[in-house]
Image (tube, grey):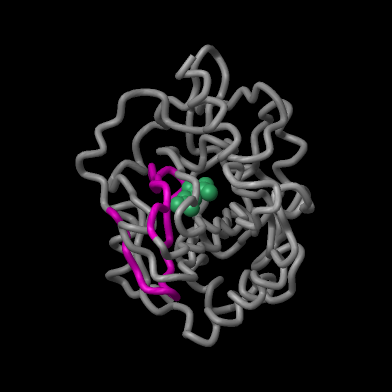
Amino acid sequence: MLTPQQLEHYRREGYVVYPAFLSPDEVSALRVGMGAITAGSTLASHDKTRLEMEPNQAPDGNLVRRLYEPCTYYERFRALSDSGRLLDCVEQLVGPDIIFHYSKINMKPAGIGSPVEWHQDLSYYPLTNRDSVSILFYLDDATIANGCLQVLPRRHEGPLLCHSSEGFFRGKITETVDTKHAVPLEGRAGTVIFMHCMTPHASVTNTSPQPRRTLILSYRAADAYLLYYGVMSSTGDNHTRLVRGKPLANARFTMREFPVPRYESKSASLYDLQERSRAAEQK
Ligand SMILES: O=C(O)CCC(=O)C(=O)O
């Protein structure tokens, strides 16, 4: 459970850091799991439905950028996403009826790990309300040098910042945003960050010799329904499942309006979208 102080921090700042949520043994087991999943994958030859490789490497390079949906495909990760200890915390944040939404592992390999530009998660998948939380599990010690998560506190109750240009969703904040007060969230392996779906966040390229692997899970209240958002709508609920409480048939609306992302095409990932957007800006 989150302590009253942790809960208060989440509500005020839009995130809270929970050190040593996972034991060293749990972290090692998840690392072993990741190793088994990625073994043998190269840029030239890998299963594109399960993972994404770092693009800037030789064809036989084996640096993985992201694993898709580990909690759907692999028992060890699934068990964590269903665990009572985690769901007790999620219940404190989004209420008793909980939908598991998606999972991924951002691998941020040493010396190359791709950056993640500033964005708010809800920009990617508009919901009828904001009771949705992203949970990041550091599986390595995360530092400023290897690209720990950075957040902009106290922005989760405001409006969604602009993530589009020329009418299309770009996967990153496209208006000027003051990041002077960004907070880097360093933490030992096993640290967990609970982050509100409207909290702006980012991380830099990992130029250090240490990897920064991070498992990310997302949950939402069972009455937070996905709005229709064009070509990507069909993928939005592919991995969802009720993990606690009961299904709720009534969508709860808490916002009068919310920007709906207009995807230019079915895009593979956040990295993809942000890279395309950077390339367009440099033209
Ligand atoms: O891995 C990171 O540093 C940030 C992850 C993130 O924001 C995402 O994958 O949506």
Range of residues picked out in magenta: 184-208
* Image spot of residue 214 (x, y percent): 51, 62
Front-most of residues 82 and 51: 51
Front-most of residues 240 and 140: 140
* Image spot of residue 120 (x, y percent): 45, 40
- The prevailing secondary structure element of the residues shown in magenta is loop
In the image, what residue occupies the spot 68% across and 63% down? 70
Whether residue 198 is in magenta: the answer is yes
Quarter residue 273 falls in: top right
Whether residue 25 is in magenta: the answer is no
Q: Is residue 188 visible?
A: yes
Front-most of residues 189 and 196: 189
Q: Quadrant of the N terminus?
A: bottom left
In the image, what residue occupies the spot 60% across and 76% down? 30
- Residue 37 placement, left or right of 275: right
Tally of numbered tags:
0
**94 to 52, vertically: above or below:** below
**60 to 236, vertically: above or below:** below
Q: Is residue 131 visible?
A: no
Q: Seen from this angle, which residue lies furthest bottom?
A: 25
In the image, what residue occupies the spot 64% across and 47% down? 58
Quarter residue 26 falls in: bottom right
* Image spot of residue 76 (x, y percent): 68, 76
In the image, what residue occupies the spot 39% across and 52% down? 207
* Image spot of residue 248 (x, y percent): 68, 53
**255 to 90, vertically: above or below:** above
- Residue 12 placement, left or right of 80: left
Q: Seen from this angle, which residue lies furthest left?
A: 180
